[in-house]
Amino acid sequence: MRRSFGVFFFILFLFFLFPLQAQDAGDDFYDDEELPLVESEGITVVGTQETTQQMAVVSREEIEKAHAPDIPALLEQTLGLGITRYGPYGNMADVNIRGFDTERTAVLVDGIPVNSTRSGEFDFNSIDVNSIERIEVIYGGSDTKYNVSGALGGVINIVTVKKQGAGWVFGGGVSNTSALPGPYNEQYGGVGNPKWQDLADAQNINVFAAYGAENYSFRMNLFGNRAGNHYLYQDYYGYARRKEGNELWDGGASASFLRNFPNLSTLIVTGDAYYGDKHIPASGYTAEYAEQKDFSTRQNIMLDMPRAFHDDFSMEFSLGHNWGILNYDPGLDPSLHRENGFTLINRWAWYPATGFTLRFGGDYRFIHLNSTNDGVHNGHRGGLYLTSEYAPVKKILLIASVKGVTDGGSVIPVPKAGIAWSIHDTFTIKNNYFRSFKFPDFDDLYWVQQGFMGNPDLKPEDGWGADLSAEWTRGDLLTLASSLYGEWTTDSIHWNNASGLWRPENISRAVFLGWENRLNITLPFAPPFPNKPVISLSWQFQLSRLLDGNARIPYMPMHILGFSMELPWKIAGVPQGSLIVSGRFESSRFADTGNLIKLDPYFLLNVTVNQEIGKNITLFGSVRNVLNTRYVSVAEYPMPGITLTLGLRMTVEVPQKEKGVNPRNE
């Protein structure tokens, strides 16, 4: 298979190269302004530039308009990604890309991997949505810039830093979320009256301060949440119940500092901390809960050198540290998990000729785990990579990459090859072939608990994938993107209790096939209302199968349909607000590898309104699950019905005065 992979790419390379070399050499070389690939915003070291893979970006403007409570809800609302979650804010949530959950998707914060080596997961609640500058989602295998191991489904890069404008900026916001109150059946009989305090079920507060100067800038964010998570739901027998035992308090802080040096070099220092005090329900249909306290902190130093000692070289260097504690106490069988890790990343680029770039570097990650259930373990993971990017003619980009990954015991080659071809200024196609690979998590290897047992004999998940995508744009009026993909894996890891004991096993082979489509249309209407409405339609088809037994992968719907309509308005030519109506349909899913527990399909409808008051204040309101749909995302964990969020956001800018200018004479 490796031989056929190489032969196919070589033939594809020659097919495009020979006919186009006959063109005028003066105009044939690659020009990044001519190739309409996705370009990064902000700082190069934490963002992705040209790539042959399908990529989507959630901008700061979209984040502010969405008012999502957390990152999974934001990605679901803006990009239509699949989400599985055990309840509302504060509960564990997974983001699914192309049939792969968070454990098999590489999550980065400012370009540095943050997936837990213990569980493979990432606590998205540890990052305040309001502190995010943008989110980049790269679909299918690992992007050739990051070369992150374990990215079977793709990469989610959460970018929190940017160069601030000159002067001070202060801001923040507050919001309140109301759950629909009503009569309900009490746990031990009788009828309970509506709890009007549910009209103040959850609150969020966030503040920030930032300062920018010519050669440096910094920013600090603080946030806090209180969530009662008290909402009405129906139990097994159709009785109305009020959710209890799922309350939480959490909060955190983040800070970043940027310093510019000669030759465009930039030093970036970031850090954050998070604390959560949570009640974790034993199941979705009981008021019994366990107490869980989470604490995590990350510190990173990053250096971006576009000119590294020579005009033909550039370099990026990152040194990161993370420390996390999870204290879970159900009363009878408490557990404590401490995870400490260091990450070192060094990336280089060499530009020996016009249209040709050679990238090389590596990463190393040391993990120390001290866990009640996993024991004490040290881990060493990382690898070295080499990537070549070649543009034989204008508007064509060829990429070939290989990385050797290791867990300290073995070295595995992970190759990738891709092409991006801008056939016309409005039409681009991309094609990729890659190997997917992931080492088992420590929980899968070593977990010990009554009724549960890890499996130290697990093999890494391994496979191959390919995708073909096309994008057609007509200026700012229309964008149509479509992508076909397929991925085949061996030794897929899943927990089952076929032997009477829950234990992870390599369930041989799995196949993932899909077709993703998205259409955005901007209607050229004149103000004041509506001003250029935006209509978005999306459809995802994904077929995932465990070949031994012909069962579908748990929690992966075959069809996801979405739509949104944004109606902005202006007054006197100034943007004033918007109305966003969005809907989402998910087909039936299964909750187990045997496909015995089937979950019903569901449709959700959301409405969000934004209204500016002057230059500094924005009022917003969001009604989620307008139709009060009863549904579950995870089996036996009912989700909230209709909720209403009201809030305001304020920003005050204090521009820096120019030297030698008397403000009285301006």
Image: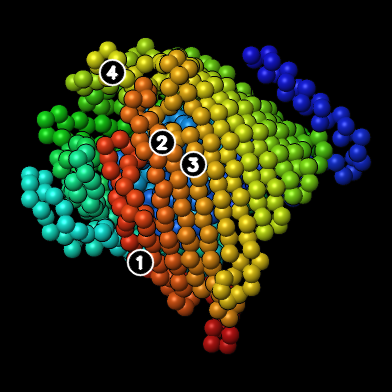
Q: Tell me the mark number nearer the camera, choosing from 4 and 2.
A: 2
SS at mark 3 in the image: strand
Amino acid carrying mark 1 in the image: Gly
- Horizontal placement of 573 versus 157: left or right? right
Lower position in the chain sequence, tag 4 or tag 3: 4
SS at mark 2 in the image: loop
Lower position in the chain sequence, tag 2 or tag 1: 2
Marker count (numbered): 4
Tell me whether the residue at label 2 lies in contact with that at label 1, contact meaning CB atoms closer than 8 angstroms: no
10 Å neighbourhood of mark 3: few (<14), some, or many (≥20)? many
| Disc 4 target residue | 497
Question: Is residue 434 visible to us here?
Answer: yes
Lower position in the chain sequence, tag 3 or tag 1: 3
| Disc 3 target residue | 560
Query: Residue 299's spot in the image, x, y percent?
Result: 40, 43
- State the residue at coordinates (28%, 43%): 638
Mark carried by residue 588: 2
| Disc 1 target residue | 647
SS at mark 1 in the image: strand
Q: How is the image coloured?
A: rainbow
Q: Tell me the mark number nearer the camera, choosing from 4 and 3.
A: 3
